[in-house]
Amino acid sequence: MQFDDDKPLDPSQVEDARASGPRPGGGFGRMPGGCMLPIGGRGGGCLLLILAVGAMFLFGIIPTSFTGDPGEQGDPGGQGGGQAPSAPATGNLAERCKTGADADQSEDCRVVGTVNSIQTYWRRALRDGGETYRPAKTVLFTRAIETGCGAADSAVGPFYCPADRRVYLDLTFFDTLQRDFGAEGGPFAQAYVIAHEYGHHVQNLLGTMDQLGRDSRPGADSPSVRLELQADCYAGVWARNAVKTGFYEQPFSQNDIQQALSAAAAVGDDSIQRRSQGRVTPDAFTHGTSEQREKWFSTGYDSGDPQRCDTFSGRI
């Protein structure tokens, strides 16, 4: 993936919270299932427990039920009633990430360029469908972060918080994706994950999440699986249309797409369960199988049409 060297970047869409460090309290976070572990740690049995019961948090959504009702959270993103003015980028992103040439040289700036492209696409796509797109910031953090959905740490992976309409990303996740889950890695694997999270933002804006209510039950045919597969499809749709946003010199190569497919397969529920417990338990699925995740990303990429991402009708 090669950015257009002369394309201006908008670093205000990415907030760098890494300098603030983890929240107070000794550097430990409570994970789903009651597991306590050093933030950023990899400790044996605890990691397996995260893999077994925390699959829905291995990039996806941290639901508002994680801490409470979104109405109690307010609108920290400042976007509930319309688009808020952009705040200055922090962590020197504004100085370092000015053009596509910077995105080709720096991981931080590549995130900025990817987010810029994704949001440019969805602004146009939703406008064409008669909807209004409201931007969502990506927040870069290290180890732990306080969000509109409550406290989270790096072990949950990248996630979207509906309560504050932000994407949260610890870049060390991509090392974990390769080391512990066997993904190929690479720049486009990162782009796929970010695009998946913005797929959840689109679902939030379109009311898809509201239609599902609080039905977060797991299972192979569950609403949560269908929601995640649609986000995969939306990621593929963006990938097909990314060059039209002006941030990339040319369409993505087959090698780029393979990086995305490898990442999607690595975090399929069946793949994670085999690694963590040695067997597959469909009743506990929250994201879909490796095959399903690859299929729906490919459906979005092959069609380039978000209307083809209806994972809620028929079989998946």
Image (cartoon, helix red, strand yellow):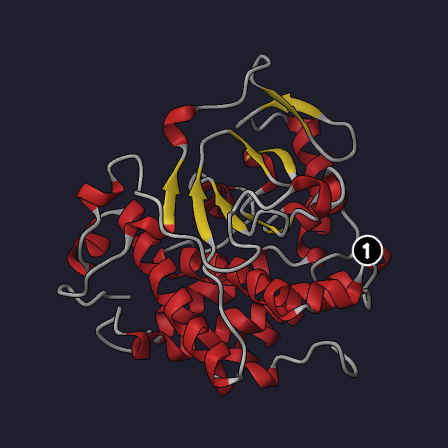
The x, y position of residue 255, in whole percent, is: 36, 70
The x, y position of residue 196, in whole percent, is: 53, 62
The x, y position of residue 257, in whole percent, is: 42, 71
Left or right: where does residue 268 sit relative to residue 12?
Answer: right
Q: Give the residue drawn at x 69%, y 42%.
A: 51
Could one spot residue 197 in this view of the protein?
A: yes
Q: Give the position of the N terminus as an image quadrant.
A: bottom left
- 83 and 166: which is toward the camera: 83
- 282 and 121: which is toward the camera: 121
Examine the image and state in which quarter residue 268 appears. Answer: bottom right
> Label 1 crowding class (10 Å Cα cut-off): few <14, some 14-19, many 20+?
few
- 208 and 55: which is toward the camera: 208
Q: Give the residue drawn at x 60%, y 85%.
A: 308
Q: Give the position of the C terminus as an image quadrant.
A: bottom right
What is the residue that sits farthest to the front in this orientation?
A: 81
Up-down relation of residue 295 to residue 52 (above or below): below
Left or right: where does residue 231 sit relative to residue 124?
Answer: right
Going by the numbered disc 1, the residue's amino acid type is Arg
Examine the image and state in which quarter residue 187 appears. Answer: bottom left
Could one spot residue 53 in this view of the protein?
A: no
Up-down relation of residue 316 to residue 287 (above or below): below
Circle 1 sits in a helix, a strand or a loop, which is it?
loop
What is the residue that sits farthest to the left in this orientation?
A: 6
Residue bearing mark 1: 214
Q: Give the residue drawn at x 70%, y 56%.
A: 269
Question: How many numbered marks appear?
Answer: 1
The x, y position of residue 281, in whole percent, is: 83, 55
Up-down relation of residue 205 to residue 139 (above or below): below
Up-down relation of residue 206 to residue 286 (above or below): below
Q: Give the residue drawn at x 41%, y 60%.
A: 191
- 85 and 249: which is toward the camera: 85
